[in-house]
Image (cartoon, rainbow, N blue to C red):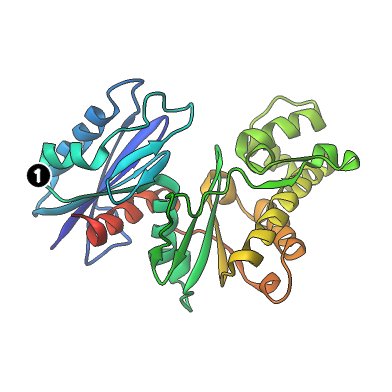
Amino acid sequence: MTLHIGVDIGGTKIAAGLIDSDRPRNVLTQVRTDTPPEGVLDRVAGVIAELLERADAPVSTIGVGAPGVIDPDAGTVISAGPTMPGWAGTPIAATLHERFGLPVAVHNDVRIMGLGEIVYGAGAQGARWSSVLFVSLGTGVGGALVRDGALVASPHCTAGELRRLICRDPALIDASGVAVIEEVASGPALTRALARATGRDEDLRAALVRHSGGDDKVRAVLDAHLHAAGEAIGGLITAIDVEAIVLGGGVGMIGEAIRRPFAEGVRTGAIAPVNTIPVVHATLGTNAPLIGAAHYGATHSH
């Protein structure tokens, strides 16, 4: 048995899991904790130490998915958003290697999640695709570009970043308004749009219950927003050319109410023949970041 640790650092929670390389789709043991306002790496080290104590075989590597733009060669945070104040410049790999003496590899959290899905999840079902775009719709909008089973390298470490893509703003269609995709298709953006349209202050899943019951207002909002996001992604895939799109994240995994209008938007926004590629749901759920991190650690640690 060869064990690897996968770590997922988020703005609100930190998760880590033990994974056996012989059964890479299974998380053997998992630890979760809240992300503190300060001392994030100390908390990360705590969950890693707990997993090392619980491991029944030697651990070979540590892989980490972290928020922000990550330099994977140095294992350092280049830049980060307002949800992680003071995070930019953090030497994640060096700090954890010094603490535990194990090889460590680090990449962006959404890139890591997409890697896990494409290598061991949806991308591994049936025919394997050599070039895939992973799209995560959740608290934000992110992505990963994977070719031949590996994350695409880029000079500024941003390949796969989607949140600044411009798309139509469904609230301003008559005025030809545009917005960045994160303001149109993220969970908070959809919740706000639904509240404006329905007058109800409720979460997205509650609105989806009414969608399944035939609520035309909910359906119209979701269709417009997801179609607009899909159009933007359709333009992107025309430029970069991939064989499939895997849709994940907390919103992306909800079901056909999300996937269908998004896929229809992709077909509208892309040109032939790339407008015929499959758009499929991710399959690993909340384990994808840990599976992807463990895989990245096993293949890139130094």
Q: Give residue 188's quadrant in the image.
A: top right
Q: Residue furthest top?
A: 37
169 with respect to 56 (left or right): right
Residue 229 in view (yes/no): yes
227 with respect to 241 (left or right): right
Pinpoint residue 168: horizontal percent, then vertical percent.
77, 46
Q: Which residue is label 1 attached to?
A: 101
Please state which of residues 126 and 293 is positioned toward the viewer in this rendering.
293
150 with respect to 50 (left or right): right
- How many residues crowd mark 1 within 10 Å: few (<14), some (14–19), many (20+)? few
Please state which of residues 277 and 194 is positioned toward the viewer in this rendering.
277
Which amino acid type is marked by label 1? Gly
Pinpoint residue 173: horizontal percent, then vertical percent.
86, 42
Q: Residue furthest bottom?
A: 127
Pinpoint residue 238: horizontal percent, then vertical percent.
66, 66
Q: Secondary structure at mark 1?
A: loop
